[in-house]
Amino acid sequence: MHPTKFTREEYQFAIVVLGQFNPAIIQPAWLVSKGWIGETEGSKAKNLIVHAELARMDFESIGIEVTQERFLLKTTQEPYFPILRDFAINIFETLIETPIKAVGLNSIMHYKFENQKARDEFVWFVQPRPTWSKVLKDPRILKAEMVDRRVQGRPGHLRVSLEVSELLRENGCKFALNDHYDISSSTGLAAKELVSILREECDRNIQEHSRLIGDLWNLFYPDNQGT
Amino acid sequence: MLNTDNEQIIDSHQSPINDKILAWVSNKVQADAIEQGDSTIPGGLAKFPADARIVESLFIHPTENTDSSIRFKAKQNWVGSVQKVEDTGIEVRFKDATTGGSDELAELEWDDINPDDRNLVRLGAIVYCSVGRMIRNGQVHNMQVIRLRRLASWTERDVDGIADEAEARMRSMGLE
């Protein structure tokens, strides 16, 4: 018998940029002075580290972690997704000379099933068990991952992984989707290309990521009652 | 292969004192201390002076992340623009961010707007609104989150760039 419930309990979004960065300049005071973070929010930064090799801070709306090779912006609350995107646009419109190699738009979604049995049925539907049962005694899925090369539009790929949710261990699944874009422009233009990607792809990707999980559920259980 | 996924994201539900960060800080302090140590001391570790200097460049606020268990399940998200600004509040024309649909006019009181965002209110300013359930430490609250868009302020270089582009376009259209 098919389960009847499939609900999203949490959605996190992260933008990861690869390139060469100067972590030391990413400080709450600088972000406030630019107007990208409000004064009150800026003054309440938590988990704050600023150093030449690493900058890390958490604000009410977003979290930042910057090393010399990687710039990560994340939020764990859906209302702040557009705030995160705007923030990234602001940063890279200002740091326009930054050498950038790639950007990833990441959705992390935790879905809850009616019970563990329903979760397991769904997972075995996505990754069929019979093949592994022929070579293993008691196969279990730790993590399933697929890559889909983007054939139209900007170069890159989509990675989708499925594993047990650390938030909902008994009856939850975590889906992680990484929309990766290669950036080939020369230094002076790379940040501009990044900003275009953020402007044009962010919202669309967020919608596509949700739709993809919905489609997967619909394949398993055509009379969709997921939320 | 370049990796832009979220594997290194620190999960909001883990301990806010992240092991990776602490390990990095600890290694960094130790490595720098050794590097700057007095070589006349056996082992070359002048721990205290070097530590003090390094710690000065690392400002670490003790972590008290009480928000680590906040989750927000959005039911609906809107994007709008400010149509009217009055003493009592503002009028915003919203559109459903997911489904589109018809525009809706909403009146927001000043108290509905985050104090940090009030100075961003002006005609045409972009407003994001989400309605849903906030789950904080196991307690569920119906919530509305309203935030205004923050845009990079324009620099002299931006303005010059736009002026140059406009000039070039005028030239290409023979309107000089």
Image: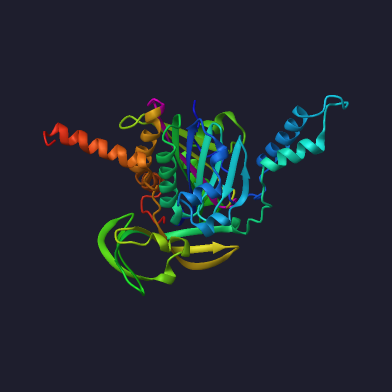
Asked if one can make out residue A2 in the rendered structure from this viewpoint, the answer is no
- Residue sitting nearer the eye, A96 or A4: A96
Q: Quadrant of the C terminus of chain A?
A: bottom left
Pick the front one: A189 or B99: A189
Residue at the far left: name it: B174
Which residue is farthest right? B42
Residue A179 is covered by the magenta coloring: yes
* B105 relative position to A36: left or right: left
Residue at left 42%, top 40%? A94
Is A157 inside the magenta-drawn segment?
A: no
Tell me where residue A68 appears, x and y as whole percent: 56, 32
Q: Is residue A85 above or below residue B129?
A: above
Looking at the image, is B155 positioned above or below residue B94? above
Q: How is the image coloured?
A: rainbow
B22 with respect to A9 (left or right): right
* The magenta segment: A168-187
Residue A120 visible here: yes
Query: Does A16 sit left or right of B105 as displayed?
Result: right
Residue A179 at x, y = what percent?
Answer: 42, 37
Picture layout, residue A126 above or below residue A1:
above
| Location of residue B28 in the rendering, given as x and y in whole percent from the top left corner | 70, 34
Q: How many numbered marks have been drawn onto this rendered protein structure?
A: 0
Identified at 62% across, 48% down, the residue is A48
Q: Residue pushed farthest bottom?
A: B88
The quadrant where residue A158 appears: top left
Quarter of the image where one finds residue A92: top left
Q: Position of residue B164 (x, y in %)?
A: 26, 35
Instruction: Please indicate whether residue B29 sits to the left or right of residue A90 in the image.
Output: right
Q: In the image, what residue occupies the spot 62% across and 39% down?
A: A51
Q: Is residue B125 above or below residue A132?
A: below
The one of B41 and A69 positioned closer to us in this rendering:
B41
